[in-house]
Amino acid sequence: VVVEERPTLGPGGEPEPAGEVGDVTSAGAADSVVVEPPPAPPARRARPVAPIEERLQKGEDIIVQISKEPIGSKGARVTSNISLPGRYLVYLPLSRQIGVSRRIASDEERQRLREAVEAVAPESGGIIIRTACEGVSKREIQSDLRLLRKLWTRLSRKATTLPAPTILHQELDVVLRT
């Protein structure tokens, strides 16, 4: 989009005000055409979300995941959208979506991975295919998903048996993971 690359100067050396969209200055200079900005992308349909007071009852136990550690006087950021990262996949036990990393450029590889995951995807739970999954066999994908589903089963079992509040799972430190 080009919006007045060079302002047209009036008799006193002052810039002339811009005209209407598509107007050309009195001198006919094509380089001072005012162009309309592109239309905004269509807004995503937002699902109506009930206030938290309507979704939870006082004293109700819920499972949350820390998405950002506390810093200074700010507390931790928590979410009820649980995600369990694996080597090749991220398992979303409370979701139903299947997504593929944007960094996987090949459409053929994206389609192959999506089909491989859809073939083994559980009835409940969503999956995000990580970039590390590129070129990985279907067997390795199945193995990673099996491990993540077992982890979720253990966590949900712990959640029903242990008193709240409690830590159900803690990932290894970055140094220990590598």
Image: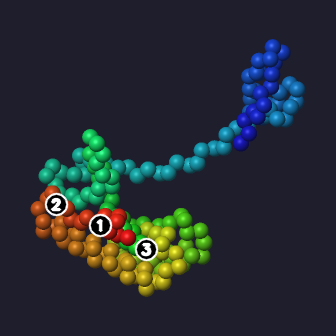
- Residue 114 position in % (x across, y down): 50, 75
Q: Residue at x 40, y 73 (%)?
A: 87
Label 2 Cα crowd, 10 Å radius (few <14 / some 14-19 / many 20+): few
**Residue 131 visible in the snapshot:** yes
Q: Which disc, if any, is residue 136? A: none
Relative horizontal placement of residue 65, taking residue 127 as reference (left or right): left
Q: Which disc, if any, is residue 88? A: 3
Relative horizontal placement of residue 110, taking residue 69 as reference (left or right): right
Pick the front one: 9 or 70: 70
Q: Mark 3 or mark 1, which has the lower sequence index?
A: 3
Picture layout, residue 28 above or below residue 88: above
Relative horizontal placement of residue 101, taking residue 47 as reference (left or right): right
Label 2, secondary structure: give it: loop
User: Given the image, on which type of amino acid does mark 3 rest?
Assistant: Tyr
Label 3 Cα crowd, 10 Å radius (few <14 / some 14-19 / many 20+): many
Residue under pointer 1: 172
Camera-nearest label, 2 or 1? 1
User: Given the image, on which type of amino acid does mark 1 rest?
Assistant: Leu
Q: Residue at x 37, y 68 (%)?
A: 85
Camera-nearest label, 3 or 1? 1
Picture layout, residue 67 above or below residue 157: above
- Residue 39 position in % (x across, y down): 63, 44
The answer to which quarter of the image holds residue 121 is: bottom left
Q: Mark 2 or mark 3, which has the lower sequence index?
A: 3
Quarter in which the N terminus is drawn = top right
What's the distance in space between the residues labelled 2 and 1, CA to CA? 17 Å
**Residue 98 visible in the snapshot:** no
Relative horizontal placement of residue 159, taking residue 137 as reference (left or right): left
- Residue 62 position in % (x across, y down): 21, 58
Q: Residue at x 81, y 14 (%)?
A: 12
What's the distance in space between the residues labelled 3 and 1, CA to CA? 17 Å
